[in-house]
Amino acid sequence: MAQLPGISPAPAAPEPQAEHHRVRLALSHWLRNASAAGPICLSVDDLQWADADSLRLLEELWSMPEDSPVLWIVTLRDREHLPGTPHAELIERAIQPSGSIVQLALHGLSPVAVEQLMRAEMGDERAGALGAPTIDEVVSATAGNPLYVLTTARHLVDRGAGPVGGTGLTVPPSLASIVAGHLARLSEADRELLEMAAILGEEFDPILVGVASGIRDPRTLDSFLSTAEHFRLLAPHTTGGLRYSFRHALVQAAVLHRIVPSRLAQLHLQAARAAEAHPHVPDRLHMLAHHYARAVHLIGADEAIPHLLAAAAASLQQRAPAVALELYRAAQALLTPESPVEQRCEVHLGLGEAGYRTGADYRAELLTAARLAYGAADLDRLVRAAVANNRGWYSSTAEVDRDRVAVIDAALAMLPSAGEQGYRTERAQLLSLWALENVRDAARREEVLHRSAESLRIAETLDDPDVLGEIMNQRYTVLYATWMDPAGTYDFARSIDAFASSSLNPDLQLRSAVAVAQSAMTMGDIAAADRALERAHRLATELNYPARLWLLGTWLATRTGMRGDLAAAHAQANEHFELGMALEQPDAFTWYLGQQFAFQHASGQLAALAEAVEEHAAPLAKQIPAWRAAYALALTSVERWSEARAIIDDFRAGEFASLPLDVLYLHGLSFLADAAVHLRHIDAAQELYELLLPYEGMLANNATIDAGPVDLRLGTLAALRGDAAAARGHLRAAAAFCRDNDVPLWLEQVTTAQARLQ
């Protein structure tokens, strides 16, 4: 102050009041002189650290008459001192709003501003490389506090670490020091309560904090909450009620970071015991699982695992399979060779059930569960493992999954005899699944149909609409896959859909929509197929069934191709092939290759795919004879006439019996018909015409692979036979179908055939 103009050297040891008066007069004089030439702006930073004399001086200056054009900008943290203390009262009095003093509260930065600040600190390239989810997490963890944002950004640059907060990742050391300074202002008792609050979560019930900490006097808890709220560590939750949350997730993370592991485990155990004693705690099962798992070294795995299993089962019921899978994996990590077999079986069952819903490997887990259950003679868990190990239809188009069938056989053998009471539901489910899994075994066709019918008969006597709906859908799959009366199968699919629409079961509604979409497509009812396909895809998305989304995605690709947009169809097919491979679907490649074959054939580009067909046809033809028919057609596209004719004649020698009645029966006949027309093979044309004639008006289309209208093949075969009138009629029907149903993909081939006929 002595350096300011107008202040003369003070005498030694002046009286404090006189010195204060002298300084105030000198500052007033200086302000008037400094602002005489024009307005000035003065800044005071961190007012909270000013001493008492400085606060009194500023209060007097700010209360002076407004005779000088001076703008004061003052920053302070208004919660550094507890209410009622002398210093807090001085600050409050000095900045009391008036005609000349305006207070502006600062709030957290917006998400956009947080990203801009991070880019300014880290550089656009580094910040951009973090990705939107990481930046969103920084926004959430810091609540837009600029200091916390900058500290986190610098930490990400220095360490390449992930964001902090709810994910439990690293807390920047500088931020930990800042939080430590905040915590130092709390009493030891309040710090311990804050630690328990951090253990309970970013949002918590303060009553549970008190119970877990052994606090009996509510005034102690009220005092803690008031103090923590004053220092802006905690805040009442926005949802209202008696809930609090940490103002910044970073603060919670930093508090947890300070707790030594042994005390951390003890606090988790206290939290678990408190939650267990209060049955009305929200989301109690997940809370118990979380805390007991983190206290496992104090209580042992046998006590922690059941809580993890209970929470995981609840997550599956709540349609949160990803959460369930993580909980089951946490339980698996705690298993030991000494763990009870029932517990190990339950963990593997859960891993399989949750894995199916999330797209993770589920087959191996459920087979392991089945082996454990069988070894323990645990019929209930064996049945559960058998029923769960199913993707919704047969396991593979190419082959029977013998391991799954063995589990079903073992469960059926362990059931009480059919005449005894009990396990009727389980018997119906197992018989239905046995038929479903063996449907691709031509040698067991009659037994498959018999067991499928028996399972439906039992289900119809049960008072369980969900089980009945499940078995009806599996019965549909068996009928469609064995090519039993396609028109009747379509009617059955529609009856299932009507049954499902009256239920509140979205799984059943999804399965029935799938059945209608597929069978309607085959029957040429494209409008109904489109409606059902859209509905099925919406339900599969809402329910998040990865295997169904893969299947339906391939169907949508086929429908896009039928509309003539082959570029988009190829893109969709490629995308869902990748999904199918990621989900380890055993027939993902088979169906993908079939789609590519159909697209290339319909567009007259089959020669480009002939080499790939030749490479894969031989091994595939052993399980799927329709691929041999496709190979014959591919050979004609590259003018290997004799080889193609040999294949057709081989089919003819067995009266086409080697082409099984299945989902590719019409495809195989259609491919052979096209090859016969290219070869001008009149004898084959006559035989194929008679085989295809019962299916006129239908499509050789199982929703995944589209081989076009049957009438197109009937028309070209009739023309080759010399029956022009029949040919014109069939081709006219095919052209009308293509025009009426938005199927331009095949219309060009139809019109070309009509032109040749002229």
Image (cartoon, rainbow, N blue to C red):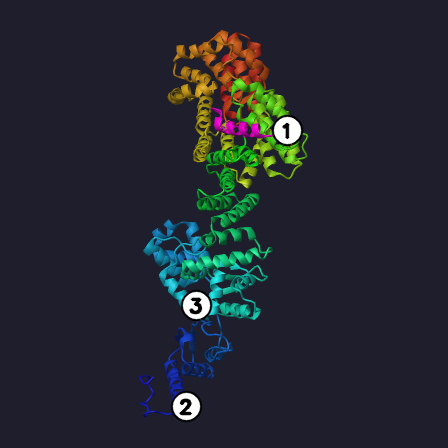
Helix, strand or loop status at disc 3: helix
**Disc 1 and disc 2: Cα gap in Å?**
97 Å
Asked whether residue 342 is in view, the answer is: yes
- Residue 271 in percent (x, y) is at 51, 58
| Residue found at x 37% / y 49% | 129
Q: Which residues are magenta?
A: 393-418
Give SS at disc 1.
Answer: helix
Residue drawn at 50 percent across, 29 percent down: 404
Q: Nearer the viewer, residue 603 or 83?
A: 83
Three-letter code for the amino acid on which mark 2 is drawn? Gln
Q: Amino acid at mark 3?
A: Leu
Report which quarter residue 37 is drawn in. bottom left
Residues packed near mark 2 inside 10 Å, few (<14), some (14 to 19) or many (20 plus) = few
Q: Which mark is residue 518?
A: none
Q: Which mark is residue 494?
A: 1
SS at circle 2 = helix
Q: Nearer the viewer, residue 411 or 139?
A: 411
For label 1, count other residues whose C-alpha is less than 10 Å away and answer few (under 14), some (14-19) or many (20+): some
Give the amino acid type for the residue marked by disc 1 in the picture.
Arg
Please give the residue where the numbered disc 2 appears in the rendered image: 17
Q: Check if residue 233 falls in the magenta segment.
A: no
The disc, 2 or 3, on the residue closer to the chain's N-terminal end is 2
Camera-side mark, 2 or 3: 3
Q: Which residue is mark 3?
A: 183
Quarter of image, res 251: bottom left
Residue 164: where, in percent of width, then height?
41, 56
Name the residue nearer the viewer: 462 or 225. Answer: 462
Q: Position of residue 431 (x, y in %)?
A: 59, 27
Q: Tell me residue 148's x, y (percent).
A: 41, 61
